[in-house]
Each structure stands twice: as structure tokens, then as C-alpha cells.
Image: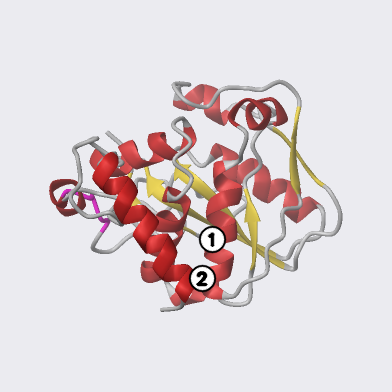
Amino acid sequence: MNVADLLLRARDELLAALVPPACAACRTALTAAHAVLCADCRAALPWLRGPRCVRCGLPLPCGEPCPAHAAAFAAAWAPLAYDGPARELVAALKFGGALPLAQLMAAQIAAGAPPALLRDVALVPVPLHPARRRSRGFDQAARIAAALARRRDLPLAPCLRRDGPATRQLGASRATRLRSGRLAIRVAGAPPRRALLVDDVHTTGATFDACARALRAAGCEHVAAVAYARALRG
């Protein structure tokens, strides 16, 4: 460990003594200066295990037909269910500005993702509407994608832009989310040949589908999707 790292660690330990860090999920005080989650929340993370549909990312059986049977993306995956501490972490990043969580999410994606998903691809963050990016001061998908790119030494291709009104996905019904033309996505510049879309949450897949259709229309040959958390049916 070099001098700079030692100074940073000493600073963190001093801050932790003055203002004890809190669990990013439940806000319980933490005893370790470099911890993000308390032991209970870490143990309660809803990891998705067992066989899953390659196409939609849901545990099998995913439904008949698969929810992504007509989607423009070829595969989807997420390490966690959108529930419990994982849901709280997403909210802490997206609405609480807890930017270091993007590093944690990228690490958990990188650790468990199927090798083929991260092979020979460029990472394309799902774009946040400009109005929301101005309001929050950052784009959570872009932060996760950048952290994942560094971890896996992958190119980053932030080539998508969001146009039209700032439609709200959170709280919208499935039918509303899937309504054709609701999301206006365009490609700025040349897209990568093989793209992996990156977002914080995969719910209905409508946003991934709109992004994938824009990429495919611009000449992208293959599009897959990865998110930190996958909303489960029911």
C-alpha cells in the first residue's frame, strides 16, 4: 500500500470515528470504515440462483411465451432479484446519490455474469432522460457501465440518447411500460458491432427493448442486456 492509500485509509477511519458509516440498505450504523452493507443485509441479498431463461433472465419456467420472445435483445441477465436489500441499494444510488454503490454493483455483475455475456462486447449504458440527469447530477446506468468496463477491461460506448418527454417508468403498469413508442431512443454516432446494454434494474424489459431496437436499426449485429437487479413476476 502506497502513502496516498495509507492517507486515504487514515482519513476514512477518522471520519468513521466522527460520523459512523451507515449500511446503504437499512441505515444501521457500521463498525467497519470501508463496509457498505451490514452483516444482516449482506446475508439477505436476494441472489438469483438456479436455471434461468437466457432470453429474459427470469428463473425457469419464465412463462409461455417468454416475456422477451419478441424483444430485440438476444439475452438478459442480472445477479440479484429486485427485492429486499438489492431494491434499497438501487434506491440509494438512484435517488440518494450514493455513487460508490455503482462500484459494488459492477463488482457483483462482473463476479457472476456468464462469461459469454461479457465476451467481445462494448458496454452501452441505458440513457437517462436529460431532465433527470440534470436533476440528479449523474446517470446511474452510466456509472455502473463505466465501473464494469474498468473491471473487465471492456470498451464503453455511450452512444444512446433519450428524446421526447421524460416518461416515468417507476410505478407505471406493465401495459404502460410496454406501449409502443413510449420511449424515444436514438443512436448518436456509430454503434458497436456487438453491444451489451447496462442498467440498474430490469423490470418488463421495455427500456432494454427500445434501446436494442435503436441499436439494431443503426447496424448493431448483436445486442444483449445486463442489469444489477431483475424484477420477478408476482
**Of the pair 215 and 38, the residue shown nearer to us:** 38
Q: Position of residue 162 (x, y in %)?
A: 73, 35
For this view, does 141 lie left or right of residue 204?
right
Report which quarter residue 163 is drawn in.
Answer: top right
Region of the chain picked out in magenta, as a range:
44-48
Residue wearing tag 1 = 147
Are discs 1 and 2 less than 8 Å apart at CB? yes
Residue 133, relative to residue 66: is it above or below?
above
Q: Secondary structure at mark 2?
A: helix
Position of the C terminus, as image quadrant, is top left
Q: Position of residue 13 (x, y in %)?
A: 30, 55
The residue sitting at 64% across, 36% down in the picture is: 128
Amino acid type at image mark 2: Arg
Dominant SS in magenta = loop
Q: Secondary structure at mark 1?
A: helix
Position of the N terminus, as image quadrant, is bottom left
The residue sitting at 34% across, 46% down in the picture is: 63
Task: Tell me, yes or no, whether the highlighted magenta stretch contains residue 100.
Answer: no
Q: Position of residue 106 (x, y in %)?
A: 46, 59
The residue sitting at 55% across, 43% down in the picture is: 140
The residue sitting at 19% across, 40% down in the picture is: 29
Question: How many labels were placed on the picture?
Answer: 2
Residue wearing tag 2 = 151
Residue 122, relative to residue 163: is it above or below?
below
For this view, does 68 lie left or right of residue 32?
right
Amino acid type at image mark 1: Ala
